[in-house]
């Protein structure tokens, strides 16, 4: 895990009114905290009156998570549905019960939100406190909106912890139907296909090189299905078991392990 380092990232606030919240977060994670215009680090987690945002000060990009507006809200209204490859990958089928999903590498919660829009109860696990803060802030804001009520009622809960620990501690009576893994994959440097948000996350998190262990733990838990998202052409995770099947969509492959 790449722990946030005070050389790379600090915490900031737009106005003194947000100072206390920003300072509390900074203290908990041993990061420096200051007004935004005084930030010296390349990245800053900035607290504003409206939201929490990750800003890349080196190229003036910022990243927030929004489950109501933006591209995710658009996808909920106009895209998606049970025909999506990702829906097939987690085993959604007409006439079958909707599975519960543990998204063990939740990141910015985009895939988790797609599962929730399909009616799944979703548990999100994210180990980076910075990324988890962005997602928690988005959940808190969305919770004020009536459009999010069904998602909350079905279950959409976030845990800022490591997936390996979380999976190992799942009680037999609380097993999810599906465990979903989407680790950071080493992309070619400056590849145009790496979206700007992903570039910021790569700067913050590096690559996830320990997902084999998480997959092994998931297989040992014997949930019904495990799905690993990979870029098309990437090798399967190196464990002693081949995927049962896979689904491909543009640029992405879902390796499915059925137990
Ligand atoms: C590629 S991103 C996931 C993107 C996500 N599927 C989405 O739709 O936004 C991978 C995320 O998994 C997290 N991660 C990787 N390994 C993890 C682990 N063992 N436990 C918890 N989180 C993990 C990383 O911190 C990163 O935020």
Image (cartoon, helix red, strand yellow):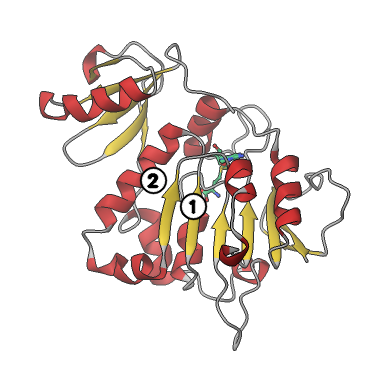
* Image quarter of residue 88: bottom right
Seen from the viewer's position, the closer of residues 41 and 106 is 106
Q: Which residue is mark 1?
A: 124
Q: Residue furthest bottom?
A: 95
Residue 216 image offset from top left, x and y in percent: 76, 48
Residue 100 image offset from top left, x and y in percent: 55, 68
In the rendered structure, which disc, 2 or 1, sits on the residue that comes first in sequence? 1
| Element under disc 2 | helix
* Image quarter of residue 28: top left
Seen from the viewer's position, the closer of residues 27 and 139 is 27
Side of 7 relative to 150 (left or right)? right
Q: Quadrant of the C terminus?
A: bottom right
Side of 212 relative to 203 (left or right)? right
For the question of whether residue 252 can be seen, the reply is: no
| Element under disc 1 | strand
* Image quadrant, ligand 1: top right
Circle on res. 135: 2
Seen from the viewer's position, the closer of residues 218 and 173 is 173
Residue 99 image offset from top left, x and y in percent: 57, 72
Q: Is residue 254 above or below residue 96?
A: above
Q: Which residue is rendered at x = 49% and y = 34% of the image?
A: 128
Distance between mark 2 and mark 1 Cα atoms: 10 Å
Q: Which residue is rendered at x = 68% and y = 64% of the image?
A: 223
CB under 8 Å between callouts 2 and 1?
Answer: yes
Q: Is residue 160 above or below residue 200?
A: below
Side of 245 relative to 147 (left or right)? right
Circle on res. 203: none
Residue 250 image offset from top left, x and y in percent: 66, 57
Find out if the beta carbon at label 1 lies less than 8 Å from the nearest ligand 1 atom. no
Q: Quadrant of the N terminus?
A: top right
């Amino acid at each position: 895990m790449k722990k946030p380092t005070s050389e790379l990232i600090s915490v900031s606030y737009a106005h003194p009114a947000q100072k206390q919240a920003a300072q509390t977060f900074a203290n908990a994670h041993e990061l420096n905290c200051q007004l935004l215009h005084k930030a010296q680090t390349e990245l800053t987690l900035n607290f504003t009156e409206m939201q929490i945002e990750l800003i890349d000060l080196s190229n003036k990009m910022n990243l927030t998570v929004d489950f109501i507006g933006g591209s995710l809200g658009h996808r909920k209204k106009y895209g998606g549905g049970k025909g999506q490859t990702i829906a097939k990958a987690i085993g959604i089928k007409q006439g079958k019960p909707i599975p519960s999903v543990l998204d063990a590498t939740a990141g910015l919660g985009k895939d988790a939100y797609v599962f929730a829009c399909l009616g799944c109860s979703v548990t999100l696990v994210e180990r980076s406190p910075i990324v988890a803060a962005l997602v928690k802030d988005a959940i808190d804001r969305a919770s004020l909106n009536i459009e999010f009520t069904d998602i909350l009622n079905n279950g959409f809960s976030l845990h800022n912890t490591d997936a390996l620990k979380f999976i190992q501690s799942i009680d037999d009576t609380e097993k999810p139907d599906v465990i979903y893994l989407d680790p950071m994959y080493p992309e070619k440097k400056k590849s145009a296909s790496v979206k700007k948000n992903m570039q910021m996350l790569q700067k913050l998190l590096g690559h996830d090189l320990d997902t084999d262990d998480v997959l092994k733990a998931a297989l040992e838990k014997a949930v019904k299905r495990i799905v690993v998202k990979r870029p098309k052409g990437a090798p399967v995770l190196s464990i002693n078991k081949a995927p049962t099947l896979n689904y491909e969509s543009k640029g992405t492959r879902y390796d499915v392990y059925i137990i």
